[in-house]
Amino acid sequence: MHKGMKYFRVGFILLVLLLFISWQPWNKTVVFGESTAKRVLFISSYDGNFLSVPDQIAGVKSVFDSENIYLDIEYMDMKRFDTKENVRLFYNTLKYKLTHLDPYDAVIAGDDNALQFVMDYQEELFNRTPVVFLGINDLARAKEAAQNNFITGIVEETSIKDNIELGLKLNQQASKIVAIVDDTLTGVGNKEQFYSYEDDYDNLIFDDINTSQYTFKELEEVLDHIDQDTIVLYFSMYSDITGKYLTIEEACEILAAHTKVPILRAEVGGIGLGILGGKMISYYDAGKIAGNMVLTVFQGTPVQEIKMIEESPNRYMFDYEILRKYNIDESVLPEDSIILNRPFTYLEENKDFIIKGIFVITVLFVIIAILLYDNRKQRRMERKLQESHEELSQTFEELTATEEELRAQYETIEKHARDIEYLAQHDYLTDLPNRLSFNEKLRNEIDSGNPGAILLLDIDNFKEVNDTLGHVYGDKLLQSISERLLNLSDDTVFVSRFGGDEFLILIANEENQERIEDYIRKILMQFQRALVLDYKEYFVNFSIGVSMYPKDSSSVDRLIMNVDTAMYTAKREGRNKYKFYCESMQDELMDKKEVEAILRNAVKNDGFILLYQPQVDVDTGFIEGFEALLRIKGYNISPLKFIPVAEDTGLITEIGRWVTRKAVEQIAEWKEKGYDTKPISVNFSSKQLQDTAYADFLRKILLEKGVEAEYFELEITESILLEKSSNTLEFLNTLKDMGIRIALDDFGTGYSSLNYLTFIPVNKIKLDKSLCEKFLELSNIKVMNSIIGLAHSLGLVITAEGIEDMEQYKRLKKGGCDYIQGYLFSRPVKSDEIEKIYHINMLDNIL
């Protein structure tokens, strides 16, 4: 065999081997973080399925992949779980990871809530770590963050004006423009930006449809009445007045079905779902810019020298099908427009086939050329056939070794892939299946048509374990609980960890409630035995929620919501209980949503009023001061009902400031009218401790209204100390140093202890109505006298609340009580009614 034939065969074998390797699954690119690589943490408050997130990450990775930078991703899942508890659980999980991993070299925050989380916990979790943000709608938040020497980024600019101009171009007869918004943080911001352009268009009537003010059924009727002379801009439509949540896909389905005009969009999502499109942000390009900012920092530029970018990379994008539906000529669109969903040409549809065909033909031509060349050189090559045979044998041996090495690498990669898949399906701490696995299992069971039930187990008082014994001990406890729960699993029982201190259990092929209750009792009995950790015994109780399928629902998300509602009902009713989900629980949740809607409306539209109840001097009978009590105008809703809702939703901060301002203004008003200045006390919730600027706000309003601090009083309860004891005492001492008087309210209930009086900086204690009723009986009067005497010995003033009859008054006066508040003298009344009794002796009214 001659040399030309040898080269041909070697070349042919190498070519085939190359094609073989390029088509094998082991040639898939797998990138593992090297120990020398920079490490960056990406935080999103959404989840990986939210429309903008994959594009953001792809843009960042387009920069990082070529620079040996490793990207780690954490999701807060705030769209589905916008609660403080979710933030706390995310904080605990992230803190645990940061404690056990190498430190990150930079952090990327992908949206407003993620940036706020980083700002809130920067000192504790990301101290001196460079932070780059993107996807930020709130320009004020972005500017505030950029003042920090370690934070910069790019904002998300909503191209509202460009889309208005586009709407006018598409509908030259338009006389009205309507924005679709809701009461979410994004919706409120977009609404404000929308109306900021109203003065620029005298020929247009600006209006909005707030989906949070209707049910989605009512909204359909509103959309049906939109006329042809109207431009519609869709911003946000996530929730209605009942709190029901829609995805963007579901919202677009409603909009497309109930409007007669093309819908423009300045936000991501909707194209291909019935929305025409518009000028939208490119999240890929924004991610790329953010990635380059991080790269600039890694190259040595200080963060404070990298200016925040206020113009986001926006592009015009439209749906081809909607253009055809409304007969819109593409020539009227901006030149750089991107048309999506356009039908492919023959060449586009068969692009891969044609490329492969060309490649095959090219290979054949090469082979033919080699054969022709070989034929011409055959005689000359025959003389060297023998030595080429040896060379060819050696080449085959090398190729065989190379193939074996590739297969070994493939097996290693395949093992890593299996490990990664396992980690994705299991909880890192307990090794139980995680929520993703549970959802998949539940989905399969529902699709199979079999009945069953799911249980959500929440450990009672688990926070105390972490707070008193530490998170390491808490993790050990969770591992021990997981092992004991796993002992209860079988072919029909699937145990998983939901997250934090919660576990999900699926009971398949079971619709008998009694047998499900038997299983729950097995769980409770299993934990009647103490868990032993580090030679110490620990007893565990659970609050358990139960939801059955398909009885309660056939939706995975709805069943999770149902079982969560049932669990919290069990927890509210005293813990260590189980509850089956029922519609009334949802009604209770909807009732809470209704109260929340009333509160939000009251905050926006001055819907609150303060009533005042006098506090009367026991000896003189004259009014010494007043307690300000909050009510909602037009609603007979007890504060016991609406204050917890305000606390859970975070509205308490704004409401608390409103109460403070109104009380100070009332003191100033009476002072201006010539009345003697008397103090007014307001109630201060433990949740208001999160308002870290409250002391400055109070100092400013007192100075502004010319009211001395000694005439303003805060009423706190002992439960306030359960929040942050050291910070709380510092806060109270700050107020005390300002001259503010502090009263300890509801003394004698719940956590009451005389021990508190030795270290809480209070001026007064208020004896609760229940305490007065219990200890003003003749047989117990000595106890009341002792309490009053002890308080006086500590230099404290005593006020008794809820006093309704004269006999109680006489006994309190004899015992040395200072002031009395209650219906005996007056109900809480409006300020004009107070003016009628401001200076009279209240004893004259009852004697």
Image (cartoon, rainbow, N blue to C red):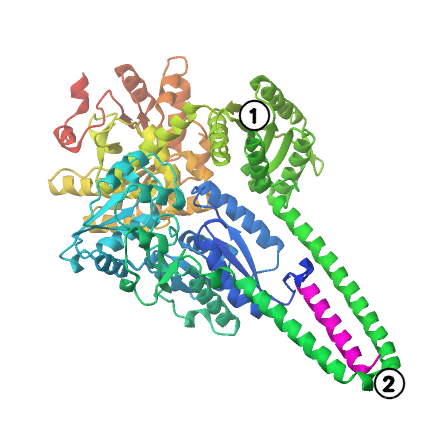
Residue 762 seen in this snapshot: no
Q: Residue 451 got which mark? A: 1
Asked whether residue 328 appears in the rendered view, the answer is yes
Front one among 715 and 356: 356
Residue 387 sits above or below residue 557 on the image? below
Instruction: Name the secondary structure under disc 2.
Output: loop
- Name the quadrant containing residue 237: top left
Mark 2 and mark 1: Cα distance apart in space: 81 Å
Tag nearer the camera, 2 or 1: 2
In the depicted view, which residue is nearer to us: 543 or 222?
A: 222
Tell me where residue 427 sits by quadrant: top right
Left or right, residue 633 beside residue 122: left
Give me the residue at 49% from left, 59% from top.
Answer: 349
Dividing the picture into quarters, in which one does residue 244 lie?
Answer: top left
Residue underneath mark 2: 383
Q: Position of residue 200 (x, y in %)?
A: 17, 60
What segment is highlighted magenta in the picture? 1-22
Predominant SS along the magenta part: helix
Graded by Cα atoms within 10 Å as few (under 14), some (14 to 19) or many (20 or more), the crowding at tag 2 reads few
Q: What residue is rendered at 28% in x and 38% in y?
A: 220
What residue type is disc 1 on? Pro
Relative image position of residue 39 (x, y in whole percent): 57, 63
- The amino acid on which the numbered mark 2 sits, given as a three-letter code, is Arg
The quarter of the image holding the C terminus is top left
Q: Between residue 780 and residue 275, name the one nearer to us.
A: 275
| Residue 8 x, y percent position in the rendering | 75, 77
